[in-house]
Image (tube, helix red, strand yellow):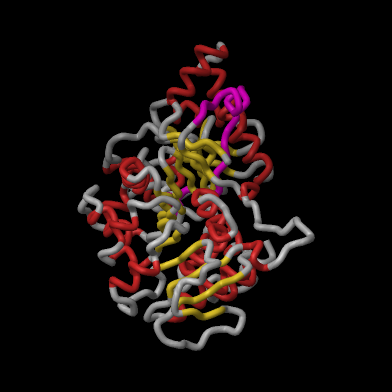
């Protein structure tokens, strides 16, 4: 995991005071990091346009020009009739706090229209601290951010504009430059699969997940299949009537005595009356809640118990915020401040683990927050969320804590989407489940 920060000016000042660095030294190292990346990607004599602002970000750009001037054809101004191989955006850094003026907006539009390779210095110009975007935001292929990772780089909106993200060394190791943060970025190396290490076990050793099977049976089948392939020893679908399901999944009309976790909400509809659901959930077993359950009268009561993971998409999260009395907002307002509303919910419900779906998944519990940036557009398909619920339910059933289950289930879900092996429009839930088995 890597630390994420809303701003790093505090860290810059700390580096100056504690380690006797100067702003000039840190700028030299920041520019050197950019220069080294450019040297690895582009041949000498490539043409590079560096667009500089007046602040420290612009100073980084001017230093970069000095460091590269003997090797590349450097320009520090914009010529609309000239083609460049590389454009470096050094206009604004992470301190932007106002709308971009018309002239600068026109310049950024021209830069974005170029087919040159685009590099953003610190953050793409036009990206604000909360992750929202100016309409003219620079669209980078690579962002080289200074010193430490900014949280704004991992908003849903920013994902289209940052490209690859690299951290520039400022002349001091990140371990010394950084301080602990309540926000963390999940890395692929954080994945821990539910591998079986004991030789003498049986199916009961790996838990029993019960999925409440509602109107849309397919959703429960997908979730149950994902759970079974992610290590759960037994999976039962609970239904009022007999329904056709794969042979490897079991079917029950009441909660099995051996159940170790429950998943409810995916495809639920109105299949069960309130009393039936209350009866099925009248226990202290770990729960993963998704989809339709967020609109059910029983949902608010469920929030009073512990060991729960919620997995809403943005529209569902606005429903949760509304009925919990936290905020009455629409989806657009939520998306403009995903970080803030997740923090508000987790403060109000510290015993609940929240997983907010999106281009970059946010997981929150108490005052600890994690961003999973590894998802792909292939996941934008019906049934993908049911797979995620099944993975989390599987880990809950096997004894993982709710936070561990949310983190590991989410990582497996997103990393599997990167191993598609076919066009990104073609993913099916069962393709995804199959790829999870080969992580």
Q: Is residue 172 visible?
A: yes
- Front residue of 52/55: it is 55
Q: Residue at x 38, y 63 (%)?
A: 282
Nearer to me, 254 or 291: 254
Q: Left or right of 72: which side holds 154?
A: left
The residue sitting at 34% across, 79% down in the picture is 271
Residue 166 highlighted magenta (yes or no):
yes
Q: How many marks overall? A: 0
Image quarter (top left, top right, bottom left or bottom right) of the N terminus: top right
238 or 283: nearer the eye?
A: 283
Tell me where residue 417 sits by quadrant.
bottom right
Using the rendered view, name the quadrant where residue 347 is placed.
Answer: top left
The answer to whether residue 106 is visible is: no
Percent coordinates x, y for residue 173 in the rendering: 62, 26
Image: magenta residue range? 158-180
* Outermost residue, right side: 199
Figure check: 192 above or below 204? above
Relative to residue 252, is residue 34 depicted above or below?
Answer: above
- Of the 4 image quadrants, the one containing the C terminus is bottom right
- Where residue 344 sits: x, y (%)? 31, 43
- Indicate whether 396 appears above or below 62: below
- The residue located at (48%, 47%) in the rendering is 371
The image position of residue 306, as x and y in percent, is 41, 50
Lateral position of residue 210 relative to residue 70, left or right: left
Residue 214 belongs to magenta span: no
Residue at x-position 23% and y-position 55%: 322
Q: Residue 435: give x, y in percent of width and height.
A: 64, 68
């Amino acid at each position: 995991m890597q630390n994420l920060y809303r701003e790093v000016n505090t860290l810059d000042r700390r580096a100056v005071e504690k380690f006797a660095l100067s702003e000039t030294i840190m700028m030299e190292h920041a520019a050197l990091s950019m220069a080294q990346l450019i040297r690895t990607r582009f041949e000498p004599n490539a043409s590079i346009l560096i667009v500089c602002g007046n602040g420290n970000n612009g100073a980084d750009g001017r230093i970069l020009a000095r460091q590269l001037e003997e090797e590349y054809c450097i320009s520090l101004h914009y010529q609309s009739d000239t083609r460049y191989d590389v454009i470096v955006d050094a206009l604004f850094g992470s301190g932007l706090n106002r709308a971009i003026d018309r002239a600068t907006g026109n310049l950024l539009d021209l830069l974005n229209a170029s087919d040159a390779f685009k590099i953003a210095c610190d953050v793409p110009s036009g990206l604000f601290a909360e992750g929202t975007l100016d309409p003219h935001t620079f669209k980078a292929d690579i962002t080289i951010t200074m010193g430490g990772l900014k949280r704004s780089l991992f908003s849903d909106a920013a994902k289209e504009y940052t490209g690859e993200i690299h951290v520039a060394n400022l002349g001091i190791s990140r371990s010394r430059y950084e301080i602990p943060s309540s926000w963390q970025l999940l890395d692929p190396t954080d994945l821990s699969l539910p591998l079986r290490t004991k030789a003498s076990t049986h199916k009961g050793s790996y838990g029993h997940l019960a999925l409440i099977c509602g109107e849309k049976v397919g959703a429960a089948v997908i979730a149950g299949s994902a759970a079974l392939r992610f290590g759960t020893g037994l999976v039962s679908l609970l239904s009022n009537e007999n329904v056709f399901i794969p042979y490897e999944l079991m079917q029950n009309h009441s909660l099995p005595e051996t159940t170790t976790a429950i998943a409810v909400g995916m495809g639920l509809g109105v299949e069960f009356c309130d009393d039936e659901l209350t009866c099925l959930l009248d226990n202290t077993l770990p729960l993963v809640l998704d989809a339709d359950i967020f609109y059910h009268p029983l949902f608010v009561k469920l929030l009073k118990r512990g060991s729960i993971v919620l997995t809403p998409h943005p529209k569902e999260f606005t429903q949760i915020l509304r009925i919990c009395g936290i905020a009455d907002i629409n989806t657009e307002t939520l998306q403009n401040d995903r970080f803030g509303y997740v923090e508000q919910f987790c403060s109000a419900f510290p015993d609940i683990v929240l997983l907010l779906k999106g281009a970059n998944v946010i997981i929150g519990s108490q005052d600890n927050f994690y961003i999973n940036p590894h998802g792909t557009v292939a996941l934008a398909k019906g049934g993908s969320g049911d797979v995620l619920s099944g993975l989390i339910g599987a880990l809950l059933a096997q004894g993982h804590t709710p936070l561990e289950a949310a983190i590991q289930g989410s990582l497996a879900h997103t990393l599997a989407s990167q191993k598609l092996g076919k066009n990104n429009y073609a993913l099916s839930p069962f393709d995804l489940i199959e790829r999870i088995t080969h992580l």
